[in-house]
Image: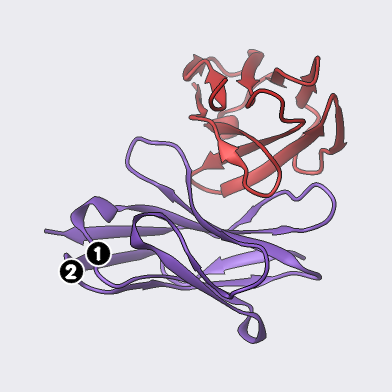
Amino acid sequence: AQSVSQHNHHVILSEAASLELGCNYSYGGTVNLFWYVQYPGQHLQLLLKYFSGDPLVKGIKGFEAEFIKSKFSFNLRKPSVQWSDTAEYFCAAASIQGAQKLVFGQGTRLTINP
Amino acid sequence: GAGVSQSPSNKVTEKGKDVELRCDPISGHTALYWYRQSLGQGLEFLIYFQGNSAPDKSGLPSDRFSAERTGGSVSTLTIQRTQQEDSAVYLCASIPNEQFFGPGTRLTVL
């Protein structure tokens, strides 16, 4: 069965700390990978996506993610977080064939203390 | 339109009533998805439309749930005889591969 797993349920950091959120996926074939963010009271927004090519992808607001095929991982990183990064982060995968529906991880709540 | 819009933004209903949730996708995009976000289950796929047909409805949790799409545009998700476990935020998204999401409809079943 297709699944996405996020390692951390709740992460608490101070401003300027570095961030890494783990994501692993289990799929039968080739997938596209995504990170979405949901700020408090707002709807899901796409942070970044990986389809093919350079495994290090850069997204909005200074976020980046690295696709490591051998580890079935797609971890999200940011060198220096800000208070405004407080949000919930969702990793998702979609098969490149068929409906291309998203399978989401459980989400990671990130709290940044000023 | 410029983005995906959904209505109503909030819906409170009594157990056993039927509800209809509406999605207006990005203009011209043929793919449309419904998901729901709930505390217990996280984000779950419900149904996918390509044009007016639904080749994948595998995520609909029961036969009380149905959806249709007309004119390759607006979609309606209908939940019959609502139950408390149907309480969730129902999200609509369009464009395959990137799936831009609408703001959702928060459904509360009392």
Left or right of residue A66: residue B46: right
Left or right of residue A59: residue A67: right
User: In the picture, residue B54 is in which quadrant?
Assistant: top right
The answer to whether the residues at label 1 and label 2 have Cβ atoms under 8 Å apart is: yes
Where is residue A50 shown, x and y percent of the image? Answer: 60, 64
Colour displayed for chain B in the image of the structure: red
Q: Nearer the viewer, residue A72 or B105?
A: A72
Viewer can see residue A108 = yes
Q: For label 1, count other residues whose C-alpha is less than 10 Å away and answer few (under 14), some (14-19) or many (20+).
A: many
Where is residue B46 shown, x and y percent of the image? Answer: 71, 39
| Helix, strand or loop status at disc 1 | loop
User: In the picture, residue A95 is in which quadrant?
Assistant: bottom right
Viewer can see residue B80 = no
Q: For label 2, count other residues whose C-alpha is less than 10 Å away and answer few (under 14), some (14-19) or many (20+).
A: some
Where is residue A19 shown, x and y percent of the image? Answer: 32, 71
Colour displayed for chain A in the image of the structure: purple
For residue A81, which numbered disc appears in the image?
1
For residue A16, which numbered disc appears in the image?
2
Q: Chain of mark 1?
A: A
Residue pictured at 62% horizontal, 47% vertical: B98
User: What amino acid is at disc 2?
Assistant: Ala
In the rendered image, which quarter contains the N terminus of chain B?
Answer: top right
Residue pictured at 63% horizontal, 21% vertical: B23
Q: Chain of mark 2?
A: A
